[in-house]
Amino acid sequence: MRKTFVDTLTKLARQDNKIMLVIGDTGFSVFESFEREFGERFVNVGIAEQNFISFSAGLAAMGYKPFAYNVVSFMTMRSMEQIFLDVCYQENPVVMVGVGGGFAYGPAGPTHHSLSDVAMMCAIPNLQVICPCDPAEMEEAVICASQTKVPMYIRIGRSIDPVVHKRKIDFKIGKAVEIRSGKDIAIFAAGTMVKDALSVCDLLEAEGISASLYSMHTIKPLDYDTISECADKYNALFTIEEHSVVGGLGSKAAAYLKESMNSSVKFKAFAVRDEFAPVTGNREYLLKLNGLDPQSITDSIKEVVNC
Amino acid sequence: MKPQDFAKAVRENAAKILNHTNDSHIGGGYSCVDILAVLYTRILNISKDNLNDPNRDVFILSKGHIAATMFAVLAQKGIIPMEHLDLHTANGENYAGHTRKFVVPGIEASAGSLGHGMGVGLGMAYAKRLNKNTGKVYVLLGDGECNEGSIWESAMFASRFSLGNIVTIVDRNRLQSYGSDEQVMNMGDLGEKFRAFGCRTFDIDGHDYDEIYDTLIKASESDFDKPAVIIAHTIKGKGVSFMENRLEWHFKSPNDEQLKIIMEELNA
């Protein structure tokens, strides 16, 4: 995803001399070619996340299109007030690209896990929150971001570069992409979990449950129309995300289903427990610990469907 | 208009606004009025007609809590209507207790939480340099604001990227919110601190119009590739005997009787 990001940004930057890349001393071995090609349109602000965001906001205020790239956990938490006041409050269209969403940096420990970022970012007015699931969605998200008039946050994982979409997608901010069409239930998965959700669909199929799967790449503004249609059409809905159960896709979908639709459709949100990871582990281990491996999710969905 | 006349009018109007609204921060407004007066009468190439000109000077008020004083400055400059001063903190209007971009013309960056203006100013200065635009970026900080770590992130950045087109001014009035600078964080020689971060600095009397002007001209000279920081030594509540160097005027607003004395003293 990082490679897709820099390749796409490089192409766009050749056509648009207002595009800039600002980093917080991260991205070694990824951005050197961009730096060589674009000189002063590449800025490394050092390990100083507050100034990182304020500086990017100032660039945007003067008409530049800064892509501010940093590790999710530091960018969102350390600079939360700068994002809130300098970017969103003042409508400066900075595109914040966060690497290491969820348990991507698993063994590094909870300082590097980012499980509250979507909730925090969604709570800020004027900000769009995008979680691309594969390189195709990432490319489209970066192209959209290069034309944005509003601030955006794009959250990616790290080393995993799954290919989910086999053909050209119709990518629109705020519109879910249907990946698989089924007749019993619908699953909405976000970002890094979409690939795992495909495995869940296969396992369910073997058990006789036919599932639709949507890539919910935009968490804000969330595609309530699709959720609404699915609530009318299917017996049960599920969300899957690599994020805390507090304030992410599942929270938003649940609130919508109950408050706005008063729907009686069965619903369950698969997300990370509201706790610091109690032990060390890699991404797969920690996901499994939270019941977020394909088999555990499949078992749980079966229980909901059959009860 | 001479800066001293501009400053007197601003002090009068700020006192009237704050008497009317019971809002705070008159002391920290008065400490930097003379700096604002020199900037807006003799330095900044801005007017209500060029606020979107990429070659304009940009002024960022980072200590956004002195909104009443800043609105009086903008009204005196003709950027907002004088009659809008009655709208400060009024329900349903645009003039909050902290300065807000877009809704108030002439405000280049919203403020309210401290330690943001310098970083935003750096982005604007960097953009001006890339665009080869003329005009400088001026940022006004409070000295208490320099407690914020973000200021020092910005100072090291300004120096590393040789931003000679940004001038930071610190209103060194030595009184914060809960106590004096010495009692709270004892920032010591601020000029020395900024020099250690690679800036060129000037220590001046922040109430001497000629010295403010001469220093702003020197600080704005573009032959230098080092960012300039002016430590303007000031008096909180400057110009009114019962407010000068009094901590409580960070919070208090003048009542009718005090307003009368303020007017008398400013016109003495």
Image (cartoon, coloured by chain):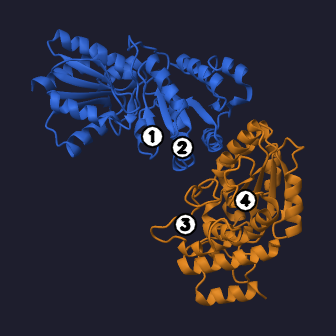
Chain colours: A blue, B orange
What kind of element bears circle 3?
loop
Labels 1, 3: one chain: no
Chain assignment, label 1: A
Q: Which residue is mark 4?
A: B186
Q: At which x and y percent is residue B182?
A: 72, 63
Distance of label 4 from label 3 (alpha carbons): 34 Å
Mark seen at residue A83: 2
Q: Nearer the viewer, mark 1 or mark 3?
A: 3
Name the residue beneath numbered marker 1.
A121
- Identified by mark 1, the residue type is Met
| First-in-chain label (4 vs 3) | 3
Q: Residue at x 79, y 77 (%)?
A: B5
Residue at disc 1, secondary structure: helix
| Mark-to-mark CA distance, 2 and 3 | 23 Å
Q: Residue at x 85, y 70 (%)?
A: B208
Q: Amino acid at mark 3?
A: Tyr
Give the quarter of the image for residue B114: bottom right
Q: Looking at the image, can residue B34 be seen?
A: yes
Instruction: Note whether residue A267 is visible.
Output: no
